[in-house]
Image (spheres, rainbow, N blue to C red):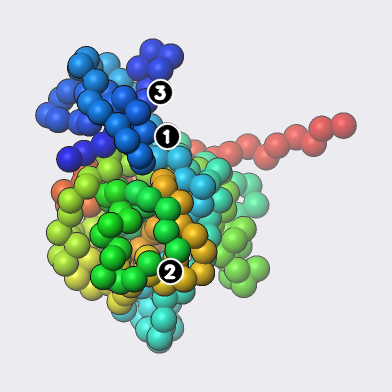
Amino acid sequence: MRFVRYRFDDLIGYGVLEDDIVQPLIGDLFGSYTRGQGQIRASDVSLLAPCVPSKILSFTQNFADRAREAGMAAPPFPLLSLKPPSAVTGLFDAIRLPPQSTRVDYGAELAVVIGRRGRWIAVEDVSQYVLGYTCANNIVARDLVELDGSWIRGGGFDTFCPLGPTIQTHLALADTLVQCRVNGQTRQMTSTHDLLFGVPQLIAFASSVMTLEPGDVVLTGTPAGAGPLAAGDVVEVEIEGVGVLRNTVAAEPQARSRG
């Protein structure tokens, strides 16, 4: 099943996408809901980021090739960072390059959408807490990460976490293809088979630190090949079985001070 979050006229809602039809949901996607009677053509709606997380948990260096590329040994345990919910943007929205940075990188990632509240989740129980999976582009101002020695500022700008286009409830996690293209050229291509820590391990680890809430997003790591973006680029993240997340890139003009 594929869930979408959409705008139709002045209405924002969740629905089920089947072929080219969106069937609206009545109730709470993360609680109790039913399918409505109406149907809307997909071409008549605007797809939004598929969820509104209270937090975004980001795991770094979770592919061996990425760790080698960064000149690091494979970590002995998952490396956890956070992105603010204000970083979320949706399908076709522009990734804005902040004036503070001269090096902003893309990073294709499989994103996990949490379906129910949980803390200290056991590895064998993780599937009970997952609503589904979506595409993510984990945008990072690489120069600021190196300057700060932290991922918070460099990964926390507005628009630095595109998500979408759908939430796929079932996915072959053992071997799902993850790709990134910039202006039509493939820059990243790997499989979830090569994750150092799989989805169950990541969610169990995260929930040992903090309570996971419905709608929260867990980014599972980007493979080797992450690189810089420039204004005017079109970047696509494709995850087998989920879809294609496509965004443009634009410079963000420096804000004027208010006096």
Q: Earlier in the sequence, mark 1 or mark 2?
A: 1
Locate the C terminus and report the quarter of the image it occupies.
top right
Q: Nearer the viewer, residue 222 or 251?
A: 222
- The residue pinned by badge 1 equals 93
**Kind of residue indicated by mark 2:** Trp
Q: Is residue 106 above or below residue 231?
A: below
Please name the residue shown 45% across and 57% down the image: 212
Quadrant location, the N terminus:
top left
- Please, what secondary structure does the residue beneath circle 1 have? loop
Question: Residue 92 vs residue 160: left or right?
Answer: left
Mark closer to the observer (3, 1): 3
Neighbour tally class for label 2: few under 14, some 14-19, many 20 plus, Cα within 10 Å: some
Q: Position of residue 112 (x, y in %)?
A: 33, 55
Q: Is residue 183 visible?
A: no
Q: Position of residue 145 (x, y in %)?
A: 58, 66
Characterize the local packing of mark 1: few (<14), some (14-19) or many (20 or more) Cα atoms within 10 angstroms: some
Q: Nearer the viewer, mark 2 or mark 3?
A: 2
- Identify residue for label 3: 12
Query: Does residue 161 appear left or right of residue 158 in this picture?
Result: left
N-terminal of the pair, mark 3 or mark 1, is: 3
Q: Which mark is residue 120?
A: 2
In the displayed image of the protein, which residue is found farthest to the front?
32
From mark 1 to mark 2, how far is it between C-alphas? 35 Å
| Position of residue 183 in the picture relative to residue 11 (left or right) | left
Q: Please provide percent x and percent y for residue 205.
A: 41, 72
- Disc 2 or 3, which lies upstream in sequence? 3
Helix, strand or loop under label 2: loop
Relative image position of residue 88 (x, y in whole percent): 47, 43
Tag 3: amino acid: Ile
